Amino acid sequence: MSRFAYVNGRYLPFRDARVHVEDRGYQFADSIYEVCEVRGGRLIDERRHLERLQRSLKEICISMPMSVRALGIILREVVSRNRIGYGIVYMQITRGVARRDHAFPSPLTLPSVVVTARLLNMSRNEALAERGIAVVSVADDRWSRVDIKTTGLLPNVLARQHAIEQGARDAWFIDKEGMVTEASSANAWIVTSDGVLVTRHADRAILRGITRTVVFEVIKAKSLSVEERPFTLEEAYGAREAFITSASQIVLPVIRIDGRTVGDGKPGPVAMELRREFHRYAEAG
Ligand code: PLP
């Protein structure tokens, strides 16, 4: 089946979808992105993702190139042209095309907008969640504003590759104080031996995940105990459960950290319940 992408005002066959060599997204990672889950052809938590997109743009002084409503129409059009029942829709906004120079280009430079979508395999993702994943720890050597969702993801790329080379699926970043910040493209959580859910507070050292936010609503509705605070790797090794959250994987149990078994080495009941309940609390539009 042919794929389509939206590039600066046009819906193009995927193979023809390209940006200019002097696009600042390409030259400097001077750009912001978002990823929404698509389920039953509907966008999950679009409102929150587009709010975060606007916040990220504001933080790096790029103006929103169109209304939220117009962007929503494009997202739906890309989802529908690509016949996505279950998958993801990706959007990226860059500072636009200009002669390569670190300083911002003329304010008349139009931001570039790209939207793509692709299918995910639901049974494969469910099977992965039933098995759980292994993670390894890596030093968090990212910049100090990872709360902004920029495409400057080289440390995340290197961390993920390192994890794969170690036979794991993902990496957990550890800050200079020895605290877990987050995973390479997800938020990190544990359930302590006392049954308390713990995830780092959303400061500038993590991305405030939309999935994380909705999981907090599930936790509240189920009256589970939760603490937003940093936790150490040692605490994670000794946890009853561990998991990660992201738009594409929702809640994914972690069963091994640095080769050590978490809990009984199986996906934990709390993580699996949060995974099952998630879409009752997320917005579908
Ligand atoms: N942290 C990082 C570094 C990410 O890249 C992501 C998602 O891409 C997340 C956390 C989770 O965010 P969300 O739940 O909005 O997908």
Image (cartoon, rainbow, N blue to C red):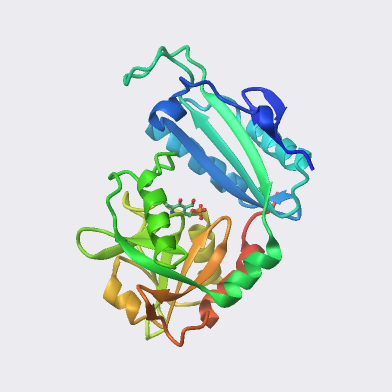
Q: Nearer the viewer, residue 47 or 92?
A: 92
Residue appearing at x 63%, y 65% in the figure: 125
Q: Nearer the viewer, residue 39 or 157?
A: 157
**Farthest residue toward the left?**
177
* Figure quadrant of residue 236: bottom left
Q: Nearer the viewer, residue 134 or 173?
A: 134
Query: In the rendered view, does 103 fall on the left or right side of 34?
Result: left
Query: In the rendered view, does 269 fall on the left or right side of 78?
Result: left
Locate residue 117, reporting x and y percent: 66, 43
Residue appearing at x 60%, y 28% in the figure: 67
The answer to whether residue 254 shows anywhere in this view is yes
Q: Nearer the viewer, residue 232 or 44?
A: 232
Counting every numbered tag in the picture gives: 0
Residue appearing at x 44%, y 15% in the figure: 98
The answer to whether residue 217 shows anywhere in this view is no
Locate residue 132, reporting x and y percent: 53, 74
Q: Quadrant of the N terminus?
A: top right
* Figure quadrant of residue 231: bottom left
Locate residue 62, reporting x and y percent: 44, 26
Residue appearing at x 48%, y 77% in the figure: 224
**Farthest residue toward the bottom?**
264
* Figure quadrant of residue 161: bottom left
Locate residue 47, reporting x and y percent: 59, 45
